Amino acid sequence: MNRWKALAVLGAAQFLMVLDASVMNVSISQLVEDFDTEVTAIQAVITLYTLVMAAFMLTGGKIGDMFGRRRVFVVGLAVYGVGSGLTAVAPTLGVLALGWSVIEGLGAALVLPALAALVAGTYTGRDRAVAYGVVGGLAGAGIAVGPLLGGWVTTYLTWRLVFAGEVVLVLLILLLMRWIPREPPPAHRTSLDTAGVVLSAAGLALVVLAVLQSGTWGWVQPRNPPFTVLGFAPTLFVVALGGALLYLFCLHERRREARGREPLVSLDLFGNGALRSGLTTLLNQNTILLGLFFVIPLYLQVVQGLDAFETGLKLLPVSVTMLAASLGGSLLLRVASPRTIVRGGLVVLLAATLWLIGAIEPELHGASFAGAMALLGLGMGMLASQLGNTVQSSVQEAERSEAGGLQYTAQNLGSSLGTALIGAILIGALAGAASSGIESDPRISEAVAGQAAVRIEAGVSFVPADDVAAALAGHPEVPPEEAAALVENYESAQIDGLKAAVLACTVITAASFLFTGKLPADRPGRGPTGGPPTRRSASDGPGGGA
């Protein structure tokens, strides 16, 4: 069992990295009250945390190459612990943003790429597959357990205890660092590509910012943006600006390599078919997972009226089956290749989302919903058991920190897309269903329907039906029977919007099959895809997918 001591340390760090983001999401109401602020201010703090991680993940990977992954892992954990401690005692919103969004975000950007490379460097063969399965399962478990833990602590104690507990966990991990084997110092230390850092950080930050704010700004027609561009919402323009900076980053990296200087990220890595497929599937997985974890709590809390702790309990089957499937992924490698397991996981995930569409009804059917959640965790666990290992095993030892930076950048982009894209589809479907329902309802007069259409056009929110009823009660020009009909149509539109959002996740799942063609088709050690290709010969030859 001694060989798994390192995995215990690395797995705990992975769980820690994903836990507090999900805790923060269920603590928004309490944070608003404690800091005497608005929901939008807390959401901005959460957005900033994601931006910092996404912007500096590639840089964190490169720093691991320069100074040693184990050393950078330790430094990153220390930085993260300082941020957690500052967050736990934050007296103002500004201190909260500094501690959680900035300091913790920078710490995570150092820890995660190093963590991915340390797993690959510590384990080989099937042990490595088991290790990545555990790490992937713990990441998913952290996302699912966060609402349960955060809901309970926030409801009965205080959210600050979660961050104080993170400091204790960081100290414990640091004390157990002797369980992770020391590595030889880097053969040579190159200077950091500062221009590449600036271009990549700015480009990724702008893309992620625009995607995260799309629900507030609007994609084309402006909703509530801070400014407009030629009368349009700024979202697509900010995405384009970020894309232009990333294009300049690619040109800069090519020019730097041509001059014989060390780039921030070698673009030759993208010629590696297995790496490309692994990163794309990871992005899709996180888009689906975070999209569903945006939709499902709305269904449970807003439609069904459950509190944060009860919502966490309903999500518990996802954690259990995801962790079990992640751990069992290495056993599947005895009879199937990573490509087959990933495709099988997508089939299970497809079935789970279709089941969930049927389970979302005005009345919650506990057994059916729990079954859909368990199947969802099973599919996600099958993916998690293979993708991290595929990414790291597809590159050479010297490239693992770069691959780790790319891996967690893809996961961050997927998470941002999941929340923003699925959220936008939900609100759009809610508005469309409410408009058509009200327009065709004979119980509602033309005058009232016209007023409702104007309100919906101005922007509709996903709120409890009781809030809609209370708002209508304050409008004497709306007769009670018509107000009741409006509320009924809104409730029906909520279900339609939720189903449409889950259907979008189903479509993304189905489309993900197109990107699995270059995943390893042989069991580890059984064929030509068992080892990593060299940087210059990684194109894989003919084959399907990305």
Image (spheres, helix red, strand yellow):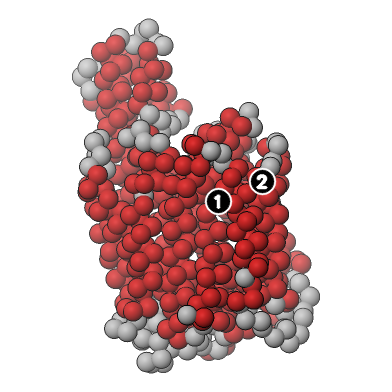
Q: Amino acid at mark 2?
A: Thr
Residue 8 visible somewhere in the drawing: yes
Residue nearest the observer in this picture, 239 or 169: 169
The residue sitting at 76% across, 72% down in the picture is 192
**Circle on res. 20:** 1
Q: Relative to residue 161, is residue 524 depicted above or below?
A: below
Q: Position of residue 206 (x, y in %)?
A: 62, 52
Helix, strand or loop at disc 2? helix
Q: Is residue 308 above or below residue 416?
A: above
| Residue name at image x 25 percent, y 59 percent | 351
Residue lying furthest top:
476
Q: Residue at x 47, y 47 (%)?
A: 149
In the image, taking residue 147 as reference, residue 337 lies left or right, namely left
Residue 364: x percent and y percent? 25, 39
Position of residue 358 relative to residue 184, above or below, is above
Q: Nearer the viewer, residue 532 or 183?
A: 183
Residue 67 lies in quadrant: bottom right
Q: Residues within 10 Å of mark 1 (few under 14, many from 20)?
A: many
Q: Is residue 110 among the parts visible in the rendering?
A: no
Q: Position of residue 104 (x, y in %)?
A: 65, 54
Q: Which residue is mark 2?
A: 87
The picture places residue 432, in percent across and down from the top left corner, at: 34, 35
Of pointers 2 and 1, the one earlier in the residue sequence: 1
- Mark 2–mark 1 CB contact (< 8 Å): no
Among the 4 quarters of the image, the one containing residue 260: bottom right
Please rate how many residues cluster around mark 2, counting C-alpha atoms within 10 Å: few if below 14, some from 14 to 19, many from 20: many
Q: Tell me the number on the disc at residue 406.
A: none
| Residue type of the residue flagged with mark 1 | Asp
Residue sticking out furthest to the right: 191
Query: Which SS class for mark 1?
Result: helix
Q: Compute the Cα span from label 2 to label 1.
A: 11 Å
